[in-house]
Image (cartoon, helix red, strand yellow):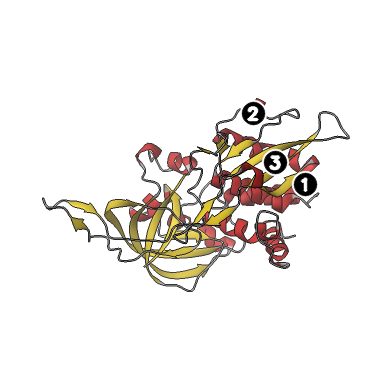
Amino acid sequence: MKAISIRQPWAELILQGKKTLELRTWTVGYRGPLAIHASRTIDREACAAYGIDPVQLTTGALVGTVELTAITELSKVEFDAHQSDHLATGRFGYTHPMYGWHLLKPQALCKPLPMRGRMGLFNVNDLHPQSAESSEDGRTDRIKATTPLPIAASSDAPAGKTSDGTKFTPFQLRVIASDARPGAYSLAVFQRPLMTTETGNMSYLPDDTRLARVAELRGDALRAVADHVLDALRRSAYRATDLHANRREPFHLGEETGVRLGLLFLALSPITKSSRIEAISQGLRRMTSEEAYYWYSKCAAGSSAGPADGKAHEHALKALRVLLADE
């Protein structure tokens, strides 16, 4: 069975039958049974809008199944007309292209199955909403399902320690002081390289000397997205006052925070027009976790954080800017 990762409370609303149209900026040819994975990210704005307690939501697990019956491209008029089906409000505005994934027959699993999500669609084997292995006393204990591990750690996983005792996280944000202008600085996102384990999965290398630069942002573009940077720092347990020109210690970022900030820096580094900067930054803010991971994997391929792939990364960045700002 195919599965898709969706942030909460949208996954819960789908299983309640209240949300029957999932919005994506990409489409697939697959139709049929679709497992719903609740990602670790919770949209608290949506929780407030629909009266859902975020504390009660299941995250980081398979939570149910639906039937994917069709995918249709939506115009702005169709997007507005189907608001009661997709439930998107507030900052979740219309972008082009936008596809509506039609979901029917929601069924919740009798017990959520903890699992890491992946970008796009991924495979889950032997998953049945009402079938489970039972213990000797007849209670349902766990649902049969397996899935490959994602290419990296779970979103914003807790920090670990390297061999020399320093903090270990997948991403870092570093302050680069300006030699020409005292008090001025740029910011650069760095990513820890990945290695293949003996089991064929991917894992981050716990070695601070090998972090690769993803992208750097400075000047007007950096000032224009200062709120994005500060949000990323707050999500990583830092204060706004921790960011200053004299800071030498890196900011340690979890995976999803690093992916989103790295993608933002990659997309904006050559842009100078304020209207485009605003359109791109807001478009990236509206992306689901899965969309952000997808675009980051494409756009970071040509940076020092990813393997070279000819001009593919440049084409991906151009496509992203066209998508978000009609560049």
Q: In the rendered structure, which amino acid carries the disc numbered 2? A: Ala
- Residue mark closest to the camera, 2 vs 1: 2
Residue tagged by mark 1? 274
Q: Which callout, 2 or 3, points at the residue further toward the start of the chain?
A: 3
Q: In the rendered structure, which amino acid carries the disc numbered 1? A: Ser
Q: Which callout, 3 or 1, points at the residue further toward the start of the chain?
A: 3
**Which quadrant would the N terminus be assigned to in this image?**
bottom left
SS label for mark 3:
loop
Q: In the rendered structure, which amino acid carries the disc numbered 3? A: Val
| Residue drawn at 38 percent across, 55 percent down | 14
Give the CA distance from mark 2 to mark 3: 14 Å
What is the crowding at mark 3: few (fewer than 14 residues within 10 Å), some, or many (at least 20)? some
Residue 111 appears left or right of 302: left
SS label for mark 1:
helix
SS label for mark 2:
helix
Residue 49, position as x, y percentages in the image? 45, 41
Given residues 227 and 211, the one toward you in this image is 211
Give the CA distance from mark 2 to mark 1: 23 Å
Given residues 41 and 143, the one toward you in this image is 143
| Residue drawn at 69 percent across, 38 percent down | 174
Residue 176, position as x, y percentages in the image? 76, 37
- Residue mark closest to the camera, 2 vs 3: 2
Which numbered dot is residue 225?
A: 3
Residue 121, position as x, y percentages in the image? 46, 64
In this view, 5 is above or below 164: below
Given residues 7 and 198, the one toward you in this image is 198
Residue contact between numbered discs 3 and 1, judged by CB atoms under 8 Å: no
Residue tagged by mark 2? 240
Q: Which callout, 2 or 1, points at the residue further toward the start of the chain?
A: 2
